[in-house]
Amino acid sequence: MLATVLRSSRFPVYSKPIVTLFHPICRRFYHLSAVYTPLTPQMDAADASEETLRGVLAEKQASVDAQAGVVRKLKAEAAAKADIEAAVESLKALKIEVSAVAKRLQAVVSSSGGGSGDREAFRQVVVNTLERRLFYIPSFKIYRGVAGLYDYGPPGCAVKSNVLSLWRQHFVLEENMLEVDCPCVTPEIVLKASGHVDKFTDLMVKDEKTGSCYRADHLLKDFCKEKLEKDSTLPSVKVAELKHILAVLDDLSTEELGAKLKEYGITAPDTKNPLSDPYPFNLMFQTSIGPSGLSPGYMRPETAQGIFVNFKDLYYYNGYRLPFAAAQIGQAFRNEISPRQGLLRVREFTLAEIEHFVDPEDKSHPKFVDVADLEFLMFPRELQLSGESAKLINLGEAVRKGTINNETLGYFIGRVYLFLTRLGIDKERLRFRQHLPNEMAHYAADCWDAEIECSYGWIECVGIADRSAYDLRAHTDKSGVSLVAHETYPEPREVEKLVITPSKKELGLAFKGNQKMVVEALEALNQAEALEVKAALESKGEIEFGVCTLGKSVIIKKNMVSISMEKKKEHQRVFTPSVIEPSFGIGRIIYCLFEHSFYTRPSKSDDEQLNVFRFPPLVAPIKCTVFPLIKSQQFDEVAKIIARSLRSNGISHIIDITGTSIGKRYARTDEIGVPFAITVDSTSSVTIRERDSKEQIRVSIDEVASVVKEVADGQSTWADIMWRFPTHSASHVDD
Amino acid sequence: MLATVLRSSRFPVYSKPIVTLFHPICRRFYHLSAVYTPLTPQMDAADASEETLRGVLAEKQASVDAQAGVVRKLKAEAAAKADIEAAVESLKALKIEVSAVAKRLQAVVSSSGGGSGDREAFRQVVVNTLERRLFYIPSFKIYRGVAGLYDYGPPGCAVKSNVLSLWRQHFVLEENMLEVDCPCVTPEIVLKASGHVDKFTDLMVKDEKTGSCYRADHLLKDFCKEKLEKDSTLPSVKVAELKHILAVLDDLSTEELGAKLKEYGITAPDTKNPLSDPYPFNLMFQTSIGPSGLSPGYMRPETAQGIFVNFKDLYYYNGYRLPFAAAQIGQAFRNEISPRQGLLRVREFTLAEIEHFVDPEDKSHPKFVDVADLEFLMFPRELQLSGESAKLINLGEAVRKGTINNETLGYFIGRVYLFLTRLGIDKERLRFRQHLPNEMAHYAADCWDAEIECSYGWIECVGIADRSAYDLRAHTDKSGVSLVAHETYPEPREVEKLVITPSKKELGLAFKGNQKMVVEALEALNQAEALEVKAALESKGEIEFGVCTLGKSVIIKKNMVSISMEKKKEHQRVFTPSVIEPSFGIGRIIYCLFEHSFYTRPSKSDDEQLNVFRFPPLVAPIKCTVFPLIKSQQFDEVAKIIARSLRSNGISHIIDITGTSIGKRYARTDEIGVPFAITVDSTSSVTIRERDSKEQIRVSIDEVASVVKEVADGQSTWADIMWRFPTHSASHVDD
């Protein structure tokens, strides 16, 4: 059985997109409510065809565009706040409809995909190998573990440390980023400002008898899926309804979710007991700072806030120059209600985050040219909405056409692509997916996720978002410390400014006790309104003027207010920088890397399949092994000399002096992805074998450490090395 | 004023020891109660001379030795548990007395030391520089911060990352340690087993009106110190009493501490309100795992437990071979009642811990010979007890003489010495202090602290303890999973084993309902007792035999029990490994490194003092700066080319193209400890200036990156490089 599984070592690469299944890593909470109403009459047919859906989508998208125009117009006209808010709400609702249809379309299009059995079997083999070789270990195993907590064992820990080193080299060093290191324990006020205290929640239900907790959306999802898969008698209207629910699941409000659970009679999965109504459960681990019990704190859910609160100091450190980026690597914590899917959804994980601060009026990037020629799989909103797959797109073109909002965002997308592929992520199973309208917070300018395909589907591993000025403004408001940047003009600029000067004397005479309200209403005029008033006063001498706070109109005369455009000299511009945030879920990247690096090959001696991780040398947990070919004191001595020299070169290695066959020893190290094996078969020279090609070269003992260092550090490739040394032909082959 | 301070840039190196002021980093809770009784009549004289104290100490030490003999004897004879416990308690009490006298002696001996004003001024200058250059930042500063939480800003973060890299290289790679990475969130049961839930506490008092919390021992200490310093009318008996309290402060029980606070009428420092009785406050940050609220968890107070619970898997990973070491770097948390002393006593910190598992019957170390010739400051128990200072002692000799308990412990002490001095810790301000009898847990075989002297006194930065089998046994007991090692004998060994076979039939006839108690008592005999019974039965045919559980003696006859020594074949030995634990407080090491690296030198141009951190290149946050000598497009281009080549060599650097004088630019980088400055003064070659010597060499543009890499990586020293390139004599000097 296992042998069969092993042979289908790599599950097929899907050409069709699969909807991402996971909770976002770095995207911040964004809850909207979406009412379930059949979107259009056509939509209720279970067999809504691809074509029908495309038609509906186009219609819906047009409404979104129109409504967006309305919002823009209202804002430009500085309409009443309530009006703007109402228009924004409608826009949000429309966006959700668009997204729901888009998801259904995706589902229809990708329904021919499948092979989930193969994928699970593949995953089982990888996970078995990973656990057996201690890449990771369920934490506190001897105490029966804790769901969602994992240890990295020795090879996993080494891979992680190599990935982080490469990250530092690729991002921090390359861009001269300002790396900081902030505590995990965070006082409440910081996470109040960021919004996490109020909004970083999942909806939960409790078994009313046992008190067991479940994620409400998981229960509804499981119910719908099972119904759709197993109940062949479902009427088509019902099928459409269930599919629609799956599409809008993330957008249901507390009440809607609760109503659905009730309507379908969903009970606790283990006991069949009734469930409570859903209620929000905050996903942060709470604690108390200091002994008084009066200072609530949380374990940070992300590292970004530590950077934002330091903006002022970092801006100073950078010589008050923009743009600059700060970076942080560290632990983050999310108290998941019911962790699933192994290493992908855990309660504690390592994040590596970058906050690139930039002038909102100039998001160009001087080094964009270095990445503009890259071409890789992108999945912009339009392709998702039209039900197409991700496509190879040229990065320069994507920015030029506005698919990607700006150069800086594009630059980071390119750098993330280079980083992931350098690690060993298969570029055919890596795509950059743009957020759909309802996935993105209203303040965000544009968001893309680097998604990696593994046996669980397409997994969001890096989020790259242009978050505009949101975070700095939130902390400015809460702390009262102004987190802004300045642009000093080379020479002062003359600007026209509106000056409204109410004459308090005249207004007092005319309106007595109401004077204050009238003054305020006059001062609150925007430019367009003020100029209108000015024109009327000049032409007619008076104007009827509505004062909201009085609930009536008054007559304003010419002598009551002076309105003028005056020229002023300004020496600098003060603004809140925009932030572009690439945020890396290190554990997810590593898990996907494990899957992408894994393959099997037949053993020569028997029917068994041998497991191999094809880690690039830079990432490999151990760079080489040293084997004396046969048990011999002489060879053991040589092995020790080589080990010493590897050690002083900083090359991680293991010596294997067990008496087993050289083939078995190769297999053992292939299985933890050691790229090079040094076999000691003489006292003057040794062979080096490369893991994947199994090619061998002969190198003198003096040179061997420096040769391995050269390839392990990535200065040379195996191909570079091959031609410099004689090939060793198979006197001690794999087995 | 500042200039004066700056000139006394380095406070004097004390030849006399200063008592460590700090809470231990890694030593686990150890509370004993000590009653205040004047130790001897002599001791009550305030002017107890050094000689008198030495006499008292010798006496006390003799009592400890005698009592230790009693305990050993009772254990060997397998005496009743209660008797052994009572003897151990007496021993502990005696040890505390010894320690109290030793501390008083130390105080007398070192009372001539001082210069605390100088030290504080020095600290102020260092801390100002560190904060101004963002080595560290009080966390969440814009929200007025949280006591005991600090961020590392860019240069601090880089130093930390370099220190950790060097640690990995020096320990993990060098010894092939198994590095693991476990979560911070830890379920209660693990910390119940380790003892932290019950014993990891400090005694706290509350202001009865405001609820403000204080560490009880701090209040008592502050009171005693102030009295002693400021009250010149104190009678000598009182002086002696207060000094004694300071000496035994750590050992006072809750009740004793409470009684003293009451007796002296100590009130809340800020409000003068009355205080509550002291009560233990657990120093762990508590939280709840999962949504139910039923699974308490804590943020780990140390990383070690993650290794212990994985012992079984790690032993398997190591091919079931001993010894081996596991290592972990990670965050640890302590919810201090009132954090003091800046970076030294914080609520969240990075630990790097090693657990070296070894056969308790063989603690030799094959590589001890590599460190045996080292000679450095050691402060063994005897020197402390006799009031002497730390002495230069040869490591090999210390182990040979038994001063250090065993080779493996000695090996790690040597390796820690090499690590710290390689980082840049001044070896004259580094000593290894052995724990006094009362500092060490009863199970520990031997403990040494690497203490570094800084402006706060001697700070414990690394603890190196032989913890015997304590931790693995504790987790075996709690989890039921046996954490043991096996030694398979090359061939089976014959061993004599005591076999006691009560004859239940005869005993039943004789003792009826009491049979069970008699059987149990017989089976519980240890070897010596059993052989005594056997001899008596053989010679007299019967023996009077006390059965505790019956509260009386019974007569045992020859036919009631058979006692024999039988030979058995054993194939393996099963045992719990001992663990030797070096535990590094990374933040404390870094802070001490900052102080040891800091110096000032006069500026040539004016009266100002310039600050310099003399970090070794490996540790320096940034390896080099690139300065175009004058503003020029040509030079800027060259600077860019050099920067690119530094980047591709992985060398951190900054370009400074501001137009300020070269001297000012040098000063700016000296102040963050950049070891090399490249000045671009032509388009073919450049100068490299070394920070401390200010020597300059001229190097071609093509070579400059590889030269800097060579010294930055520690492959060559500046001295090695100097003779290879022409010296550049001072055309652009500092200023």
Image (tube, coloured by chain):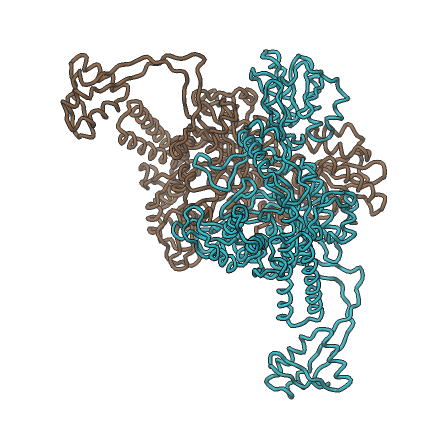
Chain colours: A cyan, B brown
The image quarter in which residue A528 lies: bottom right
Residue that sits furthest to the bottom in the current view: A509
- Left or right of B344 in this view: B665: right
Q: Is residue B699 visible?
A: yes
Please provide percent x and percent y for residue A493: 79, 65
- Left or right of A335 in this view: A329: right
Q: How many marks?
A: 0
Q: Is residue B111 visible?
A: no
Please provide percent x and percent y for residue A625: 62, 22
Please provide percent x and percent y for residue A128: 54, 31
Task: Give the camera-side residue of A590 and A556.
Answer: A590
Task: Give the camera-side residue of B684 and A543.
Answer: A543
Please provide percent x and percent y for residue A1: 54, 28
Task: Give the camera-side residue of A456 and A683.
Answer: A456
Quarter placement of the C terminus of chain B: top right
The image quarter in which residue A83 lies: bottom right
**On screen, B679 above or below B547?**
below
**On screen, B309 above or below B202?**
above
